[in-house]
Amino acid sequence: SGISQKVLAHSLRKMEEDGLVIREEFAEKPPRVEYTLTDVGYSLAPVLDAMASWGTDYKTFLKLLQKMK
């Protein structure tokens, strides 16, 4: 939820082009596709974790600022 099929498909294709994910298609009914992170994709985990932590801390900071006003 929160993202359209078109945007999701475009983002996944771009990440595949950039070598971050591998797309695997299965000849089933209904058709099924799975995406797996590559080693390069997994190498982004510390960066994404740091960004998530920063975002959480920043939200807390903003709430404190609101209380001070």
Image (cartoon, rainbow, N blue to C red):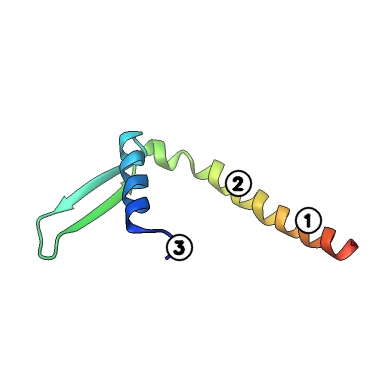
In the image, taking residue 11 as reference, residue 66 lies left or right, namely right
Q: Amino acid at mark 3?
A: Gly
Where is 15 relative to 35, above or below? above
Q: Residue at x 78, y 62 (%)?
A: 63
Mark 1 or 3: the one toward you: 3
Confirm whether residue 38 shows in the render.
no
Residue occupied by mark 2: 51
- Judged from the image, the secondary structure of the residue bearing numbered disc 3 is loop
Query: Which element is circle 2 on?
Result: helix
Mark 2 to mark 3: distance in Å? 20 Å
- Nearest the camera: 34 or 63? 63
Cβ–Cβ under 8 Å for marks 2 and 3: no
Residue hosting label 3 = 2
Classed neighbour count for the residue bearing mark 3: other residues with Cα under 10 Å, few (<14), some (14–19), many (≥20):
few
Look at 86% across and 65% down and name the residue there. Answer: 67
Q: Position of residue 58 (x, y in %)?
A: 72, 53
Q: Could you say where residue 40 lies in the image, as x and y percent from the top left?
A: 40, 36
- The answer to whether 9 appears left or right of 27 in the picture is right
What amino acid does circle 1 point to? Phe
Q: Residue under label 1, please give it.
A: 61
Q: What count of labels does the image hold? A: 3
Q: Earlier in the sequence, mark 2 or mark 3?
A: 3
Pick whichever of labels 1 and 3 is earlier in the sequence.
3
Packing grade of label 1 (10 A; few <14, some 14-19, many >=20) is few
